[in-house]
Amino acid sequence: MKLVNILASGASAERLGSSNLPLGTMKKIKQNLRIIPLSGLGEVGRNMMLLEYGKAILIIDMGFRLPEEDMPGIDYIIPNVEYLKGKQKNILGIIFTHGHYDHIGALPYLIEWIWHPNLKIFASPLTRGIILKRQEDFPQLPKLEISKVKDGSVVKLGPFRVEFFRQNHNIPDNLGLFIQAPVGNILHTSDFKFDSYPVNDLPTNFQKLRKLGKRKILLMMSDSTGAEEEKHSLSEKIIEKNLEEIFKKAEGRIIAATFASLINRIQQIISLAEKYQRKVSLEGYSMKTNVEISKTLGYLKAKKETFINGKEILNYPDKNQVILCTGAQGEAEAVLMKITNREHRYLRIKKGDTVIFSSSVIPGNERTVQIMKDEILRQGAKIFHYKMMDIHAGGHAQKEELKEMIKIMRPKFFIPIHGQYSMLVSHAELAKEVGLPEKNIVIAENGQIINLNSKEIFIEREKIPANYVMVDGLGIGDVGEVVLRDRQMLAKDGMFVIVAVVDRQTGKVIGSPDIISRGFVYLRESKELLRETRKKVIGIVNLAAGSGGAVNWVFVKDEIRNKIGQFLFSRTQRRPIILPVVIEV
Amino acid sequence: MKLVNILASGASAERLGSSNLPLGTMKKIKQNLRIIPLSGLGEVGRNMMLLEYGKAILIIDMGFRLPEEDMPGIDYIIPNVEYLKGKQKNILGIIFTHGHYDHIGALPYLIEWIWHPNLKIFASPLTRGIILKRQEDFPQLPKLEISKVKDGSVVKLGPFRVEFFRQNHNIPDNLGLFIQAPVGNILHTSDFKFDSYPVNDLPTNFQKLRKLGKRKILLMMSDSTGAEEEKHSLSEKIIEKNLEEIFKKAEGRIIAATFASLINRIQQIISLAEKYQRKVSLEGYSMKTNVEISKTLGYLKAKKETFINGKEILNYPDKNQVILCTGAQGEAEAVLMKITNREHRYLRIKKGDTVIFSSSVIPGNERTVQIMKDEILRQGAKIFHYKMMDIHAGGHAQKEELKEMIKIMRPKFFIPIHGQYSMLVSHAELAKEVGLPEKNIVIAENGQIINLNSKEIFIEREKIPANYVMVDGLGIGDVGEVVLRDRQMLAKDGMFVIVAVVDRQTGKVIGSPDIISRGFVYLRESKELLRETRKKVIGIVNLAAGSGGAVNWVFVKDEIRNKIGQFLFSRTQRRPIILPVVIEV
């Protein structure tokens, strides 16, 4: 795999473009730009969008999301890229806005489908570092070449001229996109929030945003994740102040759990550790790698001697220790859960510990986090979490900021992106509040094709496939509705296999049928039920065979499934999956 | 089953007591009162507590809770009453504080275990009505006799004199308990909040509470459910005001979803419907029965003509309709979910509808509710939920109220009850804040035995069984760890049954092994994998049998399980449950 490694910055990058669709010709202006959200609309996570003009396709982000609760065994959900089948050669490039997995995570699963020798990939240095590090987990995939872009970089890709601009988020090096397309200018906010006093990052450059706003924006697509939250997101400055209060008062160890991707939060904790004479042990693979990447690329400042490797931290007095770890969401495999469950190799919660949960709780994880918190409290530690004081800020603009962004950019058309449907609706309301006409706002869904020209915006009648593609172990997309439904049924009432061996001559059951059951009843305490079931199975088979002539074994199996199903339900009010096996010998 | 039906009120009830343990004798005072929370501490729901003095046992509440996410197929979790085995005859009575299922729900599952002819049951009229209605779902159980008690009632049960006092909550007829025991006075708050402007209920009687507080309270046990929430719970007056705003503005139908047990909220919605010339259709079995009980007993005021039966409501103009239904939590079988999924017999969401979610979201249900909200919005309705405006108030005292309660009662000892462990800890902190000494506060857990006398409080070293007892269909307690773990494994990666028929003479596999798999891979697209698996199975069996001598079939099955497990994992990174069946013929 060979990728041209262009370092695009300013005008030099512009010259590298290979547009055969020059701007400004009437013929091209008449053509609509097609905006195709493959995913990320009506959901949080799995962001991937196509811009298609004529044949030219530009991809923005390739994220994954985590499965819903009713998808047992599934690792991730990735976008459906069926629409790109046969169009691979038209893909001019992929642009990554920032290094969070809901924007980059699907790349390793999809790259083989869409790759071609002229495909160009662009990302900021930190985003690029995270992507390349992750690719190492997929040694079978060829190495990617990714061009670095930064605030002010310009890249020309066919009919598109993309200008990158810095946006505050909770990871450094996040870039919004100002895209000049033949139909007009498009602004893509990326995930963002306004922060005038950020930590480890420059404050929001309102002057620059206003300049962009003056360049006649035909369409703005803006992050809706915070569109249901009132007012303004918290500044990282406040978070830092509150975290410092905890550091000041803590007399014992501090165990700080956060997302490994929250580089700025990690910086805050490391800085406080240094200020309060504490050493830091990094715990958790993703925490270690992300800190390593960020340090190497200069996005994280820390003294070398601050970090102590693993177990050695225990040689320091409690008041000089910080354990910085993953698992604030109660993830089963993460460090904090292992410590809590006394499964960690050398770390245990003890009286005097202060445990900081510096993250919000992702919907769906509340119970797990509650149970973990209870367990930590039982073991005698103190807990601080975001509901008790502001020690976590989300990365997403809230209502006031979103309105401000619309006012700054004054787009003609508006599409809320990134968020549950209710968030898109709320964001659309905000746009109306600041004066955009309702007809110029499009609430779109995954798989819809939005057409845009300088005069109008509309959604095509036909949709493209945009369903969930599930990753389970090595399988991508092989777990579908059928397998999932089976898993749900198996989970609910278990299964019940009946193996009957039948004499081919007499049609009678030989011996007693075997029964194998899991997840249904505790077999040792259900002997009577099993005995009755066996008797019924023998009855069903012998009746069918006794009628003489050729035995319809499909019918016999159906009979077993139905009658035994009814019988077991009448006794237990449970419906295990019943699987009859009839063997003729 | 025969129960004495005493209507206990004031002194008359007192005379009905049959104490053989007179108050005030030194011998008895020296004996400790044992307080045994069977459940409801360190969890929300499943409240059940024992007071044991000598042999005499008093039960307070018998609730159930809903299962955790990792308990597929489980209907409810109920208390473990093993401790009561053999002590049934010592149980003097059961007192129910109020009619919520986390206080009454386990009764039908447990009553047979603990019932004896002299057992007395006490509840307020509404609580009694709800309990008796529910018993009708269990026709095999004998009819219960429940004595009515109300604010001011006094009941004497062996060494205990129980005085009932009204407490505000979000269901009417909720009673706190002032219990005179030989060791001293015990105050049990029941679930409660302070509300000076409640709806459909009298305001909190602070004067009466202060009077109780002056009667030397040795121990207070107080509801901790709201102990992590700042300030004061919202008054129902505010909720009503906000709900009225919605009614004022709604031009189309109103679909209002709430808990069927929130009688006061239901009253608010019915009253508003009457005020704004709307008819009400009650949808959902529990909604209908609870309204029926409450109306019959006088706890719900509504004009007869307000209610319109089911489908007939559609004959009225949209602006004159209210659909009052269950399902605000996204419960799969409830009405709102059926309407949303277009599965309801005659109700569909349509443009112009206003959907009110008048309930908070129970932790664990967030995703389901989000997905339902999104779907309702897609169908064109407006949504109001508790995060947008105060249209729901919890039923539980928050920090300021809890402190106030402690200040009013000034107990010597304090046990926070009803709540997750973190809530108990938070409540204990509040008690310290208002001046209770730390040593007089006991954070207890289910199954611990707390000893109390006038001088001290302590927890016994030994615990009694207090684990989850799971109800699944007709089975109570028969689903244990093993079955549950199997269900979890089945859900994650499915199962894989291999049936090999072996020739007894040669030890060789006859034909090709049968494979039955569910929830693992989509079989139609995995033919190659299955072919290879069959080949491997034949190899394993033939190798074992080929060695000559008697074949150890247990060993062969283990080999199949292990080797095929490894093989499938190497190909898929999934670990289905593998179930080998070897049949010799």
Image (tube, coloured by chain):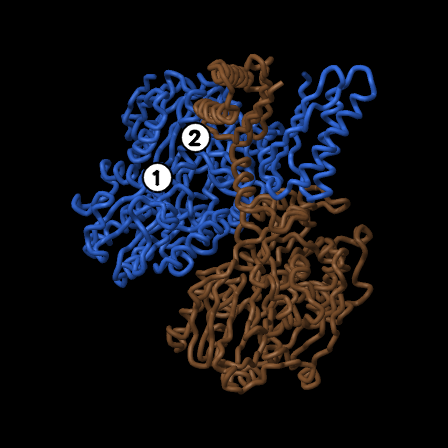
Chain colours: A brown, B blue
Q: Provide the secondary structure element on which disc 2 rests.
A: loop
Q: Residues within 10 Å of mark 2 (few under 14, many from 20)?
A: many
The part of the image, by quadrant, that contains residue B516 is top right
Q: Amino acid at mark 1?
A: Asn
Residue A445, compared with residue A575, is above or below; it is below
Which chain is home to disc 2?
Answer: B
- Image disc number at residue B106: 2
Q: Does any portion of residue B453 appear in the rendered image?
A: no
User: Residue B357's x, y, as percent?
Assistant: 37, 53
Q: Provide the secondary structure element on which disc 1 rests.
A: loop
- Image disc number at residue A22: none
User: Residue B169's x, y, as percent?
Assistant: 36, 44
User: Number of marks in the image?
Assistant: 2
Left or right: B438 as drawn, with respect to A416: right
Q: Amino acid at mark 2?
A: Ala
Residue A348, compared with residue B244, is above or below; it is above
Left or right: B288 as drawn, with respect to A18: left
User: Residue B175's x, y, as percent?
Assistant: 35, 37
Left or right: B467 as drawn, with respect to B537: left
The CA distance from mark 2 to mark 1 is 18 Å
Which part of the image, by quadrant, shows the N terminus of chain B? top left
Residue appearing at x 47%, y 34% in the figure: B76
Which chain is home to disc 1?
Answer: B
- Image disc number at residue B174: 1
Q: Nearer the viewer, residue A37 or B58?
A: A37
The part of the image, by quadrant, that contains residue A163 is bottom right
Which part of the image, by quadrant, shows the C terminus of chain B? top right
